[in-house]
């Protein structure tokens, strides 16, 4: 038995929305970063679902690239967050606010 | 059952500009390993490599190249080559102003130039991408390098903070961009740019497609700092090293617009009326918000950040015109904008005092007479940004507004003209401060570094040359603009 495409798309849209809401309301930089990863994975799910639905490999190929990019982003992201933590001893984005005007 | 794999034939001469950049990167990486070699050489290698790539791009452009590579994934046409020229000129100027900005024996110079080259390569991929995968990979290659560069001065809390803000908002934007691609893929069944245009028939105009295009606009909006997705820009420009602020404001913005234009003009012409109206509204908002907030700034880097947001709005006018004149004027504006904006940031670096940079606008009081060269260069760049003749800024704005009139967007031109007047106010305020006000306290200025002056003089020559002889750029740009 195979589920129709819509099920996957709804799940993917839900995951994406949870990710967006998480970025907007959470204040811890690491959690925000995890929510962004959730958004990327929601896109991956949509790619795979479409790819299966269309009977093409293109979408699945895209997912491999996205996973590699996401891994690189995590490496850089965590390094930058650590360097902020060294200065401020906090990664709460509301408290890291010396730049404004 | 097809069992053989077709390995596409690669014409190495076509991808030479990217290859030169990659080789330069490797040379910088290897030279950085040896302590016996002065770190200063690395910057010079970067300039030489970038200049070679620039020459190769110009040659390919003059030969009228129009081909694809790697199974139609990579497009080498006049459009991508001209954008290569914009990116490479920006990179050369940024490296020239960086040479003295980083300490002479700073051990961190190697990765700095490496990341600048990587970002440049990412931009070149974005302009050449004929497939959304390539555009996405180019975008990420560029963005990831820029996140690191923005937070490059780790010992400086402001720089780290700028890096983190740029990272979080940039990654957020990339996720929107990616989800947009996924939805467009679902609606049209392909991620190839010409393929999307082919598959986009009346019945495939589904809500899925519009949702995808909307997310794509949001993603690009963040990357090129369009209102209401601009909040990261002032913070990042203020906190990042000034050279990197110059870099982020120039090349990456041009690269974002390169992909923006290519995707919307070549893949989505079938729904032009729908996206057009969105861009008109965004252009008006971006110009107005950018210019009005810039008036209130006291920090010159923040002022330039808001001014660069406003300039993204002017480029959007060209996109919204959605015709050949619009594309060519947007491309021309991007080249002019890159040169004059890097010049303006370079002038800020030139005004370095013994205890750091003077970033408050009131610090510039009396500088015009005390430091004639600095005053002249700064005034020239600001007048060009404001769009006064006979500078290049005027030529750029003239063609942008002309294309909008041709497309019938009169309101856009009126809003743009009002904005030019608002912008003149805050640019001229700096010039007036420099020439007409007495300095409050005596600031000790550092002597001018030679490389920085060379970079600035080159930018100044570019701004004046294009302002006096616009045909130098108008004709080549018209030849390569997307239809």
Image (cartoon, rainbow, N blue to C red):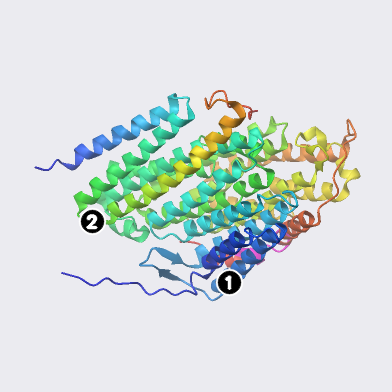
Residue A91 rendering spot, x and y as whole percentages: 53, 27
Dividing the picture into quadrants, the one containing residue A11 is: top left
x, y percent for residue B156: 67, 36
Span colored in magenta: B466-474
User: At which x and y percent is residue A80?
Assistant: 54, 38
Q: Between residues A71 and B244, which one lies in front from this camera angle?
A: A71
Give the residue displayed 73% in from the left and 40% down from the top.
B427
Viewer-closest of B217 and B72: B72
Q: Is residue B74 left or right of residue B403?
A: left
Left/right of residue B179 with respect to residue B393 in the rendered view: left
Residue B285 visible? The answer is no
Instruction: Return the residue nearer the eye: B401 or B69.
Output: B69
Residue A44 in sight here: yes
Q: Is residue B434 left or right of residue B332?
A: right
For image coordinates 59% across by 50% down, the residue present is B401
Badge number at residue B346: none
Q: Quadrant of residue B57?
A: bottom right
Q: Using the rendered view, name the quadrant where residue B162 is placed.
A: top right
x%, y% of residue B353?
Answer: 82, 40
Which quadrant, please, contains the N terminus of chain A? Answer: top left
Q: How many labels sit on residues?
A: 2
Residue A56 - label: 2
Q: Is residue A100 above or below residue B411?
A: above
> Does the magenta segment cover residue B469?
yes
Q: Is most of the magenta stretch helix, strand or loop? A: helix
Q: Which residue is the site of mark 1?
A: B56
Mark 1 neighbour density, 10 Å: few (under 14) some (14–19) many (20 or more): many
Assess whether residue B80 is covered by the magenta stretch: no
């Amino acid at each position: 038995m195979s589920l129709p495409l819509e099920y996957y798309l709804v799940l993917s849209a839900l995951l994406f929305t949870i990710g967006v809401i998480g970025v907007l309301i959470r204040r811890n930089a690491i959690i925000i970063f995890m929510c962004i990863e959730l958004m990327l994975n929601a896109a991956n799910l949509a790619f795979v679902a479409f790819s299966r639905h269309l009977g093409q490999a293109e979408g699945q190929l895209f997912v491999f690239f996205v996973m590699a990019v996401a891994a690189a982003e995590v490496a850089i992201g965590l390094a930058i967050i650590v360097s902020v933590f060294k200065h401020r001893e906090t990664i709460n984005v509301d408290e890291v606010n010396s730049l404004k005007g | 059952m097809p069992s053989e794999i077709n390995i596409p034939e690669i014409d190495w001469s076509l991808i030479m500009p990217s290859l030169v950049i990659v080789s330069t990167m490797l040379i910088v990486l290897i030279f950085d390993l040896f302590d016996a070699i002065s770190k200063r050489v690395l910057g010079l290698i970067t300039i030489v490599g970038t200049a070679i790539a620039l020459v190769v791009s110009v040659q390919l452009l003059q030969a009228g190249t129009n081909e694809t590579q790697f199974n139609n994934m990579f497009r080498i046409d006049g459009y991508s080559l001209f954008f290569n020229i914009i990116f490479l000129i920006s990179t050369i100027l940024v490296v020239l102003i960086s040479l003295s900005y980083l300490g002479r024996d700073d051990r961190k110079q190697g990765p700095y130039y490496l990341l600048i080259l990587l970002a440049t390569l990412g931009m070149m991929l974005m302009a050449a991408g004929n497939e959304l995968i390539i555009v996405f990979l180019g975008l990420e290659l560029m963005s990831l390098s820029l996140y690191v560069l923005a937070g490059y001065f780790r010992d400086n809390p402001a720089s780290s903070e700028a890096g983190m803000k740029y990272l979080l908002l940039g990654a957020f934007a990339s996720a929107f961009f990616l989800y947009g691609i996924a939805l467009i893929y679902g609606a049209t069944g392909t991620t190839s740019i010409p393929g999307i245009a082919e598959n986009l028939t009346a019945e495939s105009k589904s809500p899925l497609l519009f949702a995808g295009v909307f997310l794509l606009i949001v993603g690009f909006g963040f990357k090129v700092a369009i209102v209401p997705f601009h909040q990261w820009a002032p913070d990042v420009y203020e906190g990042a090293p000034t050279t990197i602020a110059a870099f982020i404001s120039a090349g990456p913005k041009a690269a974002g617009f390169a992909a923006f234009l290519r995707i919307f003009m070549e893949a989505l012409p079938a729904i032009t009326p729908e996206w057009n109206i969105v861009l008109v509204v965004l252009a008006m908002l971006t110009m107005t918000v950018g210019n009005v907030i810039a008036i209130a700034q006291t920090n010159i880097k923040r002022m330039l950040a808001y001014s660069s947001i406003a300039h993204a709005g002017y480029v959007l006018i060209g996109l919204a015109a959605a015709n050949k004149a619009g594309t060519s004027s947007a491309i021309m504006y991007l080249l002019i904008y890159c040169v004059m904006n890097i010049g303006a940031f370079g002038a800020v670096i030139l005004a370095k005092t013994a205890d750091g940079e003077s970033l408050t606008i009131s610090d510039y009081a009396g500088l015009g007479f005390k430091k004639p060269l600095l005053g002249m260069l700064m005034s020239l760049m600001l007048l060009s940004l404001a769009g006064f003749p006979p500078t290049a800024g005027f030529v750029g704005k003239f063609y942008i507004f002309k294309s909008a009139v041709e497309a019938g967007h009169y309101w856009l031109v009126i809003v743009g003209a009002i904005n030019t007047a608002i912008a003149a106010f805050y640019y001229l305020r700096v010039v007036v401060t420099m020439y007409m006000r007495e300095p409050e306290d005596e600031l000790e200025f550092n002597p001018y570094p030679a490389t920085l002056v060379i970079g600035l003089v080159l930018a100044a020559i570019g701004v004046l040359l294009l302002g006096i002889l616009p045909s130098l750029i108008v004709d080549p740009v018209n030849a390569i603009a997307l239809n």
